[in-house]
Image (cartoon, coloured by chain):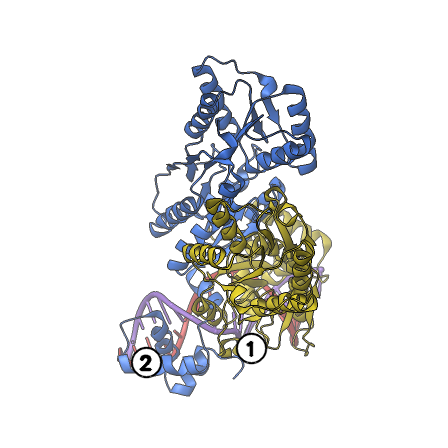
Chain colours: A yellow, B blue, C purple, D red
Amino acid sequence: MDNINIKVLAKKLNLSTSTISRAFSGSTDINKDTRERILAFAKEHNFLPNHYAANLRDKKTRTLAVIVPEIANDFFAQAINGIEEVARKKGFYILLYRTDDVFEKEVSFVNYLNNGKVDGIIMSVSGEANDHNYLKTLAKKNIPVVFFDRVYEDIDVSKVTTNDYESSFEATEHLISTGCKRIAYLVVNKSISIGKVRMQGYADALAKHGMVFNDELVVDCSQDEKINYSIIKNALEDLKPDGIFSSVERLAVAAYYVCNDMNISIPGDLKVVSFSSLQIAPLLGLSTVTQPAYEMGIKAATLLFDELDKKGQHVFKKTHVLKSKLFVRKSSAI
Amino acid sequence: MDNINIKVLAKKLNLSTSTISRAFSGSTDINKDTRERILAFAKEHNFLPNHYAANLRDKKTRTLAVIVPEIANDFFAQAINGIEEVARKKGFYILLYRTDDVFEKEVSFVNYLNNGKVDGIIMSVSGEANDHNYLKTLAKKNIPVVFFDRVYEDIDVSKVTTNDYESSFEATEHLISTGCKRIAYLVVNKSISIGKVRMQGYADALAKHGMVFNDELVVDCSQDEKINYSIIKNALEDLKPDGIFSSVERLAVAAYYVCNDMNISIPGDLKVVSFSSLQIAPLLGLSTVTQPAYEMGIKAATLLFDELDKKGQHVFKKTHVLKSKLFVRKSSAI
DNA sequence: TTGTAGGCGTTATCAT
DNA sequence: ATGATAACGCCTACAA
């Protein structure tokens, strides 16, 4: 009773393997009673058709890969929730990969997925590199890919992003409206997609209000928390900004720590607005630009399944832009 | 060039499929040059052996399932990180499942995993039900399971927990030492494992300091955020506690919101300590009992691989208790 | 409505 | 060191 399979069932029930198979596939070419008899017996013996054998036969895995930079981050966690939601409804499995923002890991994961391991991939990218061949081979193998939030512009796949430019513009204008004259922009890498677009929104908002864009006030940080702490500390000491617009949650958090230690009062001395999906932002009183993370996950997964459903046929790849929302809280109160 | 497999490779390279296979398996029974020639050619054509076919052959999936109540929660996210870390090193894939704390989902997932879908399962359970047969069939099929944090005591599998009793005792004592006379205990379900053990620590600490355990001060909450808000609000109004020990992070968060709205000052009017893995707890000033989530993930995965390595042989199942740590912050300052 | 048989891609065994 | 072959469990023409 250990290795139960279709053959064994067939023998026990005096039926053929095809009939057993049909009972599970929901085929109509089977007598209702027969099916029920089979399913009942199967249930009793805890049998389910082996997924991998079916994969091999069908060349369908009913599995998708989700590749994200981090998991312990409310944005990605919520996005994964959205993806999971859709996948579950479709009866798909989710294979989870975390890159730690290391481009090499991303490449290596994707390369692994190249031989029929999954039917599709949803990812938020980690790199800024130009050699995206590792992604192009997926297309050749007809494995659809959807990017969300962090994307490579030069790759022709469906994308789900948010209106980063507009919300950055709005957030910056908001800071200006509270009276800020020297607004610093915190960014991890000002030359890649998100950092760049958000900076543009920031810069244009300044311009609109007759304020000069000062390169000094663009504080370029790293992936390392400790280093960021020093960078931000120095920036606050040297530049004495009266406002901070942070393109990334963890830089705002770092700024908070610095302010705590330096006895800088928020919002008294310094007003702060940050991109963030922190669920407890209200408690912190942090003003945020919040992306619809969960909805982005839903959308990304939906797009992927769209492509999967039209399998083979060419699908017109689009970028779907969802709207972020500015929540003004205590950290930028007048 | 679409459907490349070892047969195709064999033909192109004038070798047999066995030789090709050996090149990938790291077998020593192959000429070094031959192997390199094969690997080079394979790489050039983006070929990797099909994982599912290998599964079918070997009855090894190199995949494990992780089942958790939530993903968008710092504790679980960090635990998953730990699991992922270990799994990656072992070359294992992770299939992720989220139960939303719905017992039926847990049962259904586990049942799905019953037919060779994964080599092992790591889970933090959602139920309190008594019918754990769905788990027992896994044992019959030699699929090892490891529980972490939330466990079923009556199931004989390896478990990773924390010293909940001691840390609850310590946290409560700490509140007493700050002068609290009426300490409320917030819990989601005081009759199941975690809620129960933590309450015992709370009760015993009170007893040690000659304080009476007052059942009224045990505030039993629900899974619903809104309902919890009212429950806690009523509790604060009616019971007028001067301290809160929360067994679960989100109840503490709810309490914070209530205090905000009711103008109750923390720690002035009310001191708060909570179990929590919130990464930004320091910023909130929330005193926490913090579980080593990441390490628990590491440990759970390690235990699972131990069982996998000794495959078949009986493994003595143990409960591994890691230590939580009390961080006293502003919310319980004197 | 049910049964037969071949093949999905791989690897282990056995032979050479 | 390399090759031929059978088998893993399933599904789907095709046949009956």
Q: Is residue B216 above or below residue B192?
A: above
The secondary element bearing badge 2 is classed as helix
Q: Is residue B276 above or below residue A219?
A: above
Side of A213 where A220 appears, left or right: left
Q: Does the image show residue A172? A: yes
- Where on the picture, by quarter, is residue A183? bottom right
x, y percent for residue B245: 53, 28
Residue A162 appears in view: no
Residue in view at x 50 percent, y 48 percent: A259
Label 1 resides on the chain identified as: A
Label 1: element kind: loop
Cβ atoms at labels 2 and 1 below 8 Å apart: no
Circle count: 2
Picture layout, residue B3 above or below residue A54: below
Q: Which mark is residue B36?
A: 2
What residue did someone put label 1 on?
Answer: A141
Looking at the picture, which amino acid does disc 2 mark? Glu
Subunit of mark 2?
B
**Mark 1 residue type:** Lys
Q: Residues within 10 Å of mark 2 (few under 14, many from 20)?
A: few
Report whether B155 appears left or right of A162.
left
In the image shown, does A149 or B264 lie closer to the viewer? B264
Query: For mark 1, does the 10 Å Cα neighbourhood hold few (<14), some (14 to 19), or many (20 or more) residues?
Result: some
Closer to the camera in the image, B330 or B248:
B330
Residue B50, x across and y down, in percent: 47, 70
Residue for point 52% across, 70% down: A116
User: Where residue B197 sits in the image (x, y, percent)?
Assistant: 48, 27
Q: Which mark is residue B71?
A: none
